[in-house]
Image (cartoon, grey):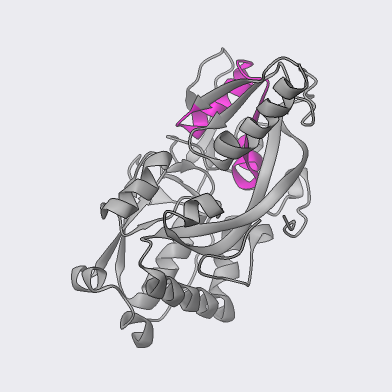
């Protein structure tokens, strides 16, 4: 897979953000407990950037391309796993969903003149929810792949890769190329859980080496906590939340190596909603031309993942 633009490391990383996609965590910065707990405790720093973006203007040509059910309701219902800072997570009130994905898709929908309703959901239930009509769209840092495009229409808008994360100093001597016999944590339903680790597991067993002990949790915050507490030796996660995890734990965790298998993120629509997807592409292009797209990504320190080839069901390897 083609690699996205290179990202500076550590504190200067363009995707680094004081808070990260922290599952079930409030928007206040969070610090993981160091006593083996799988929970997170609140820190002091604010997780919400202060930068503001201007409201996009409604495009009547796009309004005409809205699915009739959304147009008549005047609101679009969005399924999201609000535990993934800085992309989508709960604000300090424990109810309001905020983040890069939220700001960007709100701006996209402003072009259509409709309001957004963000509905927290388990990550692995969102695509099914879109298929069943529970949600009009899924927006939750979905990596675009052929398996997902077989179930839904996807619209690319961002790019990120997978990142290994360990305790500071890598005390368990994790080697990403040979994690056999180690304990690795991942979030349920992600590419890391469904594709990456199974391939690594097979390589271990084929070589006659000990299996990887895989810890899977639906909550990314608990995945992160398992590494900080030592319950897991490492975790695999997308780069933006990986950077956030390092930040939120006060440097108790660190990135191991570079991100890899960079791929687009995509909005999830019903399989038959390709025309709506094309309209969303047009809205994204307008936001890019107006400067709003990069302004939003910069606000959340994720501008390193910007793309300009927005597409419906893009070709991926």
Residue 1 in the image: x percent, y percent?
72, 55
Q: What is the count of numbered marks?
A: 0
In the image, farthest residue toward the left: 72
Q: Nearer the viewer, residue 276 or 26?
A: 276
Q: Does 178 sit above or below residue 12?
A: above
Residue 163 in the image: x percent, y percent?
69, 40
Q: Nearer the viewer, residue 276 or 95?
A: 276
Residue 244 in the image: x percent, y percent?
61, 41
Q: Does 145 sit above or below residue 69?
A: above
Magenta segment: does it hold 82?
Answer: no
Q: Nearer the viewer, residue 134 or 287?
A: 134
Q: Does 273 sit above or below residue 33?
A: below
Q: Quadrant of residue 259?
A: top right
Q: Residue at x 75, y 26 (%)?
A: 168
- Left-right relation of 299 to 243: left
- Left-right relation of 67 to 237: left
Magenta segment: does it hold 230?
Answer: yes
In the image, farthest residue toward the front: 206
- Whether residue 252 is visible here, answered yes or no, is no
- Whether residue 26 is visible here, answered yes or no, is yes
Residue 7 in the image: x percent, y percent?
76, 53
In the image, farthest residue toward the top: 35
Q: Magenta segment range?
A: 217-245
Q: Nearer the viewer, residue 2 or 61?
A: 2
Q: Residue at x 76, y 16 (%)?
A: 208
Q: Residue at x 56, y 12 (%)?
A: 35
- Left-right relation of 3 to 292: right
Q: Does 314 sit above or below residue 263?
A: below
| Image quarter in which the C terminus is found | bottom right
């Amino acid at each position: 897979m083609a690699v996205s633009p290179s990202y500076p490391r550590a504190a200067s990383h363009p995707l680094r953000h004081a808070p990260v996609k922290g599952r079930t965590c409030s928007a206040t910065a969070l610090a993981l407990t160091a006593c083996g707990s799988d929970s997170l405790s609140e820190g002091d720093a604010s997780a919400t950037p202060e930068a503001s973006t201007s409201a996009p203007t409604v495009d009547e040509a796009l309004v005409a391309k809205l699915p009739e059910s959304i147009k008549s309701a005047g609101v679009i219902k969005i399924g999201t796993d609000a535990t993934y800072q800085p992309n989508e997570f709960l604000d300090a009130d424990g109810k309001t969903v905020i983040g890069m994905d939220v700001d960007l898709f709100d701006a996209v929908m402003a072009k259509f003149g409709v309001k957004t309703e963000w509905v927290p959901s388990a990550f692995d239930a969102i695509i099914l929810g879109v298929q069943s009509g529970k949600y009009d769209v899924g927006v939750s840092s979905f990596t675009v792949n052929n398996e997902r495009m077989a179930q839904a229409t996807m619209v690319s808008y961002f790019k990120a890769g997978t990142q290994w994360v360990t305790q500071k100093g890598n005390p368990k001597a994790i080697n990403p190329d040979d994690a056999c016999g180690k304990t690795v944590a991942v979030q349920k339903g992600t590419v890391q859980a469904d594709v990456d680790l199974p391939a690594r597991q097979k390589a271990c067993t084929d070589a006659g080496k000990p299996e990887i002990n895989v810890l899977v949790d639906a909550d990314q915050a608990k995945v992160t906590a398992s590494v900080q507490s030592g319950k897991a030796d490492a975790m695999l996660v997308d780069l933006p939340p990986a950077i956030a995890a390092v930040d939120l734990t006060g440097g108790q965790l660190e990135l191991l190596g570079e991100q890899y298998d960079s791929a687009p993120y995509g909005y999830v629509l019903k399989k038959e909603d390709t025309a709506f997807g094309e309209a969303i592409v047009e809205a994204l292009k307008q936001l890019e031309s107006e400067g709003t797209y990069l302004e939003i990504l910069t606000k959340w320190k994720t501008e390193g993942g910007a793309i300009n080839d927005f597409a419906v069901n893009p070709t991926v390897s």
